Image: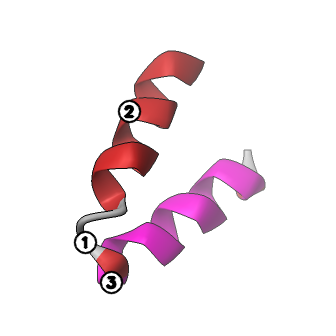
Amino acid sequence: EDRQLDALLIRADSFQPIRIPLLNAAVAR
């Protein structure tokens, strides 16, 4: 599951607007 999250974060690098919410969600967990 963590690897999936890492993959999402890496892909999110291409989408700056999405990156912040993903990081917040990761921290929230």
Q: State left or right for residue 12 relative to residue 19.
A: left
Q: Is residue 20 above or below residue 3?
A: below
Its colouring scheme is secondary structure
> Is mark 1 in CB contact (under 8 Å) with mark 3?
yes
For label 1, the crowd category at 10 Å Cα-Cα, with few meaning under 14, some 14 to 19 and many 20 or more, is few
Instruction: Give the structural element (helix, strand or loop) at label 3.
Output: helix
Residue at x-position 50% and y-position 18%: 3
Q: Nearer the viewer, residue 2 or 13?
A: 13
Read off the magenta span.
17-27
Q: Main secondary structure of the magenta part?
A: helix
Nearer the N terminus, badge 3 or badge 2? 2
For disc 3, the marked residue is 17
Q: Nearer the viewer, residue 26 or 14?
A: 14
For disc 1, the marked residue is 15
x and y, in percent, of residue 28 in the image:
74, 56
Q: State left or right for residue 23 relative to residue 9.
A: right
x and y, in percent, of residue 12 in the image:
33, 59
- Give me the disc on residue 24: none
Q: CA distance from mark 1 to mark 3?
A: 6 Å
Residue at x-position 59% and y-position 57%: 25
Instruction: Give the structural element (helix, strand or loop) at label 1.
Output: loop
Res. 14 image quadrant? bottom left
Q: Amino acid at mark 1?
A: Phe
Q: Amino acid at mark 3?
A: Pro
Q: State left or right for residue 28 relative to residue 5.
A: right
Instruction: Give the structural element (helix, strand or loop) at label 2.
Output: helix
Q: CA distance from mark 2 to mark 1?
A: 13 Å
x and y, in percent, of residue 8 in the image:
36, 42
For disc 2, the marked residue is 7
